[in-house]
Amino acid sequence: MGYAQLVIGPAGSGKSTYCSSLYQHCTAVGRRIDIVNLDPAAENFDYPVSVDIRELVNLDEVMEDFNLGPNGGLICCMEFLEENLDDWLAEELESFMDDDYLVFDCPGQIELFSHVPVLKNFVDHLKRKNFNVCAVYLLDSQFITDITKFISGCMACLSAMVQLELPHINILSKMDLVTNKKKLEDYLNPEPQVLLSELNQHMAPQFEKLNRALIELNPFVRSCRFNCFNRESRGLNLDHVMVHDGLPLEDVGIGGNYAPFQIFYKFFRSYLIFFLTRFKI
């Protein structure tokens, strides 16, 4: 059985920096990992790349040939990868041993891990190849410096959890840039009524019902609990991530919450349907 870690998150959240730190950490402790670049728009790396999607498809050529912008071109590239999972990717994976550890550095287009099924199908392919897969979701710590950004970040994170159905660890990156650590701690362990009060203060009165419905999702917000990633605790955080990747799905919770994923998924899906129906979204 092989092991795979899917590094996802919005553009600019520090995914490549995380992969570089992970590579340096594993080298220091004498553990081998191989990093796979899945971003056809990537240009420079400060870590060795074992497999590179740019050998399969070139973003600039796709944009030119199909008259697409950067986002559309990237989605097209990933769909082309999906079409070649049994050919190009299968051939590339043959060179790895059963106990090898692969880290997939993914592009930052949020559609890929929120609702477009490309990464979900990619994960299913890895599972069929007998890989044990986990997801690491990175979010810039500046995203939770106020209530509206915090809710937005949590919803995006929850969407990725539900879409991929993987053991999932959430990491706040760039913690060394945070100046107000006290404000950050309030969001790491949120109180529902405090969140509701802050939302109502930041938004117009007509959104009060929507705000209350969002805060009623608080159990799910707590389920996407974030782990802080900074230079001082880097080794400890990375060891935490590596340990989780060896556990089966039913033993690993979401974002550090050890409730079984299937219960979470069914409950969240039912509530989300109710939420969308109630507000006719």
Image: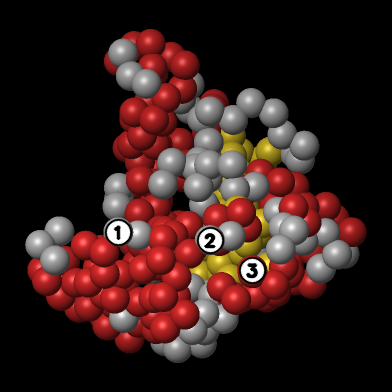
Sooner in the amino-acid sequence: mark 2 or mark 1: 2
Q: Quadrant of residue 45?
A: top right
Amino acid bearing label 1: Ala
Mark 1 sits on what residue?
204
What is the quadrant of the N terminus in the image? bottom right
Name the quadrant of the C terminus: bottom left
Amino acid type, mark 3 = Leu
Alpha carbon separation for disc pair 3 and 1: 24 Å
For disc 3, the marked residue is 184
Q: Secondary structure at mark 3?
A: helix
Few, some or many residues within 10 Å of mark 3 (<14, 14–19, 20+): many
Q: Are marks 3 and 2 in contact (CB under 8 Å)?
A: no
Numbered label attached to residue 221: none
The residue tagged 2 is 146
Provide the secondary structure element on which disc 2 rests. loop
Is residue 264 at all visible to an observer of this figure? Answer: yes
- Between the residue at mark 3 and the residue at mark 2, the CA separation in whole angstroms equals 9 Å
Query: Mark 3 or 2 closer to N-term?
Result: 2
Residue visible at 56% across and 67% down in the picture: 170
Amino acid tagged 2: Asp
